[in-house]
Structure formats: structure tokens, C-alpha cells
Image (cartoon, rainbow, N blue to C red):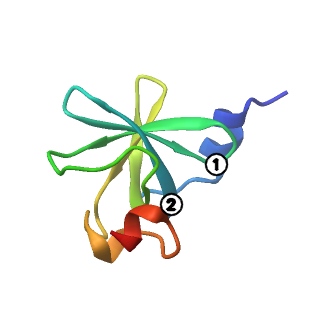
């Protein structure tokens, strides 16, 4: 039986837009959550807020973790509308 990551991995394609939520700042960027209890990494020096929702671009995997980039931009242009962070 496939786990959540394996199911997502079988459908994910590089360049795909994914809605992610910022979980925490970590070395080199942020831990983000997406899908059904999955986590990934967004390498960035941008100042983001915990809980902020972003539309990110899936890049690939590294050490069993999904890697994203701000292919759609980190900032107001990639914030999901209706979130508290986008109202600021």
C-alpha cells in the first residue's frame, strides 16, 4: 500500500503549481506543508509568516522531501487570496 508521499510522488510533475502553507523557518528557507499531511522545503531568504499560504512550483525530491521554488514569486503575487497573510 502506498503512503501519502508515494501517492503524491506518482502524480507530481516538475513545474507543477502547488498550494503550500509555511510551517517554520529552517536553515536556508522554510518548511512547508501541502497535500495530505506532507511536508516540503522552500529555499528562500524572503521573510514569510508561519501559516502563510503560497502557490509554489514543485521542483523535485531530495532526501525524501519535496522541494519547491518560488517560480510564481514569493510575495503578494503568489499568496492565496483570503488568507490572513494576504490581507496584511
First-in-chain label (2 vs 1):
2
In the image, 3 versus 28, the foreground residue is 28
Q: Horizontally, is 71 left or right of 15 in the view?
A: left
Which quarter of the rendering shows the C terminus?
A: bottom left
Residue 82 point in image, percent of width and height: 53, 74
Residue at the image position 51 percent from the left and 60 percent from the top: 18
Q: Quadrant of the N terminus?
A: top right
Query: Eyeballing the image, is 34 above or below 14?
Result: above
In front here: 87 or 16?
87
The answer to which of 13 and 53 lies nearer the viewer is 53
Give the residue at mark 2. Answer: 18
Residue 70 placement, left or right of 40: left
Count of numbered badges drawn on the protein? 2
Q: Residue at x 78, y 31 (%)?
A: 2
Which residue position holds label 1?
A: 35
CA separation in Å, label 2 and label 1 = 9 Å
Q: How dense is the environment of label 2, judged by Cα within 10 Å: few (below 14), some, or many (20 and up)? A: some
Q: Position of residue 10 (x, y in %)?
A: 65, 46
Q: Are marks 2 and 1 in contact (CB under 8 Å)?
A: yes
Amino acid at each position: 500500500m502506498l503512503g501519502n508521499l508515494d501517492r503524491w510522488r506518482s502524480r507530481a510533475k516538475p513545474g507543477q503549481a502547488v498550494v503550500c502553507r509555511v510551517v517554520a523557518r529552517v536553515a536556508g528557507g522554510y518548511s512547508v506543508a501541502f497535500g495530505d499531511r506532507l511536508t516540503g522545503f522552500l529555499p528562500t531568504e524572503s521573510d514569510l509568516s508561519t501559516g502563510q499560504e503560497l502557490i509554489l512550483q514543485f521542483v523535485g525530491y531530495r532526501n525524501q522531501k519535496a522541494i519547491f521554488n518560488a517560480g510564481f514569486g514569493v510575495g503578494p503575487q503568489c499568496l492565496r487570496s483570503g488568507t490572513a497573510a494576504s490581507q496584511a
